[in-house]
């Protein structure tokens, strides 16, 4: 009976060692976690916005901020044709206007946070960046409210 217990323990331990080697060989995760941010290049308030279901924050007219909404994941390495589903609610007076659009993620060299940029006529661009939405080093510069608009 002891012999069977020793054999069972040895098999169990060898299985654990094999699993540990498989995890080591797999390497780092192919995805990275990311926060979600919004940059609004329009004169309309964004009630909420999400990318692939992550997000939900709002943004003032002409507003830009950091990526502070948790949690999304992105591939560590960009690839051509990478698409995400962007969904946003840009109300007109008291009526919610919810729209969604498949958007290609622009090329990035390293993982970072996901920023949705909203432009007039429902144009949406998605970038990955470690610089905040209003930063001078952000991939799409945000100039804020145009001077000629009251």
Image (tube, rainbow, N blue to C red):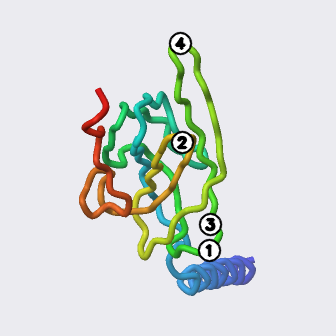
Q: Label 1, on which residue?
A: 80
Q: Which of marks 2 and 3 is nearer the N terminus?
A: 2
Q: Are marks 2 and 3 in contact (CB under 8 Å)?
A: no
Q: Label 3, on which residue?
A: 82
Q: How far apart are marks 3 and 4 (CA)?
A: 35 Å
Nearest to viewer (mark 2 / mark 1): 1
Nearer-the-camera pick, 81 or 9: 81
Disc on res. 94: 4
Q: Label 2, on which residue?
A: 50
Q: Do the residues labelled 2 and 1 touch (CB within 8 Å)?
A: no
Query: Secondary structure under badge 4?
Result: loop
- 15 relative to 72, above or below: below
Instruction: Residue at 31%, 48% (x, y): give it.
Output: 66
Nearest to viewer (mark 3 / mark 4): 4
Query: Secondary structure under badge 3?
Result: loop
Query: Which class describes the residues within 10 Å of circle 3: few (<14), some (14-19), or many (20+)?
Result: few
Instruction: Residue at 40%, 43% (x, y): give it.
Output: 41
Quarter of the figure with the N terminus: bottom right
Q: Earlier in the sequence, mark 3 or mark 4?
A: 3
Q: Distance between the residues labelled 1 and 4?
A: 39 Å
Q: In which quarter of the image is residue 45?
A: top left
Query: Secondary structure under badge 2?
Result: strand
Q: Distance between the residues labelled 1 and 3?
A: 6 Å
């Amino acid at each position: 009976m002891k012999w069977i217990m020793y054999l069972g323990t040895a098999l169990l331990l060898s299985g654990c060692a094999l699993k540990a080697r498989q995890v080591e060989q797999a390497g780092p995760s192919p995805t990275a976690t990311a926060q979600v941010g919004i940059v609004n290049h329009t004169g309309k308030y964004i009630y909420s916005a999400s990318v692939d279901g992550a997000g939900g924050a709002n943004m003032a007219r002409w507003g830009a901020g950091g990526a502070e909404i948790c949690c999304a994941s992105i591939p560590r390495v960009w690839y051509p044709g990478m698409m995400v589903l962007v969904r946003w609610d840009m109300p007109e007076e008291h009526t919610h206007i919810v729209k969604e659009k498949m958007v290609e993620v622009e090329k990035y060299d390293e993982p970072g946070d996901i920023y949705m940029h909203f432009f007039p006529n429902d144009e949406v661009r998605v970038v990955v960046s470690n610089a905040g939405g209003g930063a001078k080093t952000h991939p799409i510069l945000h100039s804020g409210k145009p001077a000629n608009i009251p």
